Image (cartoon, rainbow, N blue to C red):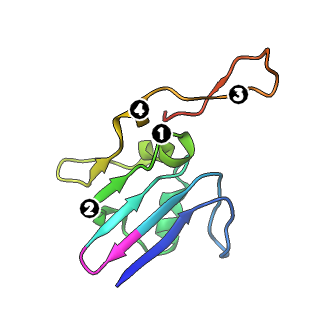
Amino acid sequence: MLQMTILTDDSARKRGLLAEHGLSLWIESNQDKILFDTGQTDVYLKNAQTLGIDKEKAQAIVISHGHYDHGGGLVWFSLRVNGPQVFLHPEALLPKFGLAKNLKAPHHPVGLP
């Protein structure tokens, strides 16, 4: 059995859950528990608590790519010795920028904090 629960996305479809631009999923099988992306902030942790998901049981955290709305929430996860391994591509840590609406304005950072 494989079950996937949306912890964070752009809309909340259930009363009591929070939404933000970004993504976080809880993926669970009979033996594995994976946190896939962490959204922008700690919204995924608040929603996990509301949904009765124990984040401490995560065996791995996967960050899909280096944008703030997929890995920014990692700073709110209390990493510990013997905690989950964190997986991300090394290039996810490189600086990333979005185009400014006004081409004369500086580009804004969109990478991981």
Name the residue beneath numbered marker 4: 93
Quadrant in the picture for residue 43:
bottom right
Where residue 71 appears, as percent x and y from the top left, is 47, 45
Quick one: label 4 or label 1, which is nearer the N terminus? Answer: 1
The prevailing secondary structure element of the residues shown in magenta is strand
Name the residue beneath numbered marker 2: 59
Quick one: label 3 or label 4, which is nearer the N terminus? Answer: 4
Name the residue beneath numbered marker 1: 66
Instruction: Report crowding for label 1: few under 14, some 14 to 19, many 20 or more residues within 10 A (C-alpha).
Output: many
Quadrant in the picture for residue 53:
bottom left
- What amino acid is labelled 4 in the image? Leu
Where residue 94 appears, as percent x and y from the top left, is 44, 28
| Secondary structure state at the residue bearing disc 4 | helix
Mark 1–mark 2 distance (CA, rounded to whole Å): 21 Å
- What amino acid is labelled 1 in the image? Gly
- What amino acid is labelled 2 in the image? Gln
Toward the viewer: 52 or 99?
99
Quick one: label 2 or label 3, which is nearer the N terminus? Answer: 2
Instruction: Report crowding for label 2: few under 14, some 14 to 19, many 20 or more residues within 10 A (C-alpha).
Output: some
- Quarter of the image with the N terminus in it: bottom left
Name the residue beneath numbered marker 3: 99
Quick one: label 2 or label 4, which is nearer the N terminus? Answer: 2
Instruction: Report crowding for label 4: few under 14, some 14 to 19, many 20 or more residues within 10 A (C-alpha).
Output: some
Where residue 26 appears, as percent x and y from the top left, is 43, 67
Q: Residue at x 66, y 26 (%)?
A: 108
Q: Are marks 2 and 4 in contact (CB under 8 Å)?
A: no
Quick one: label 1 or label 2, which is nearer the N terminus? Answer: 2
Q: Are marks 4 and 1 in contact (CB under 8 Å)?
A: yes
Segment colored magenta: 27-31
Mark 1–mark 3 distance (CA, rounded to whole Å): 16 Å
Mark 2–mark 3 distance (CA, rounded to whole Å): 36 Å
Q: Residue at x 36, y 69 (%)?
A: 54
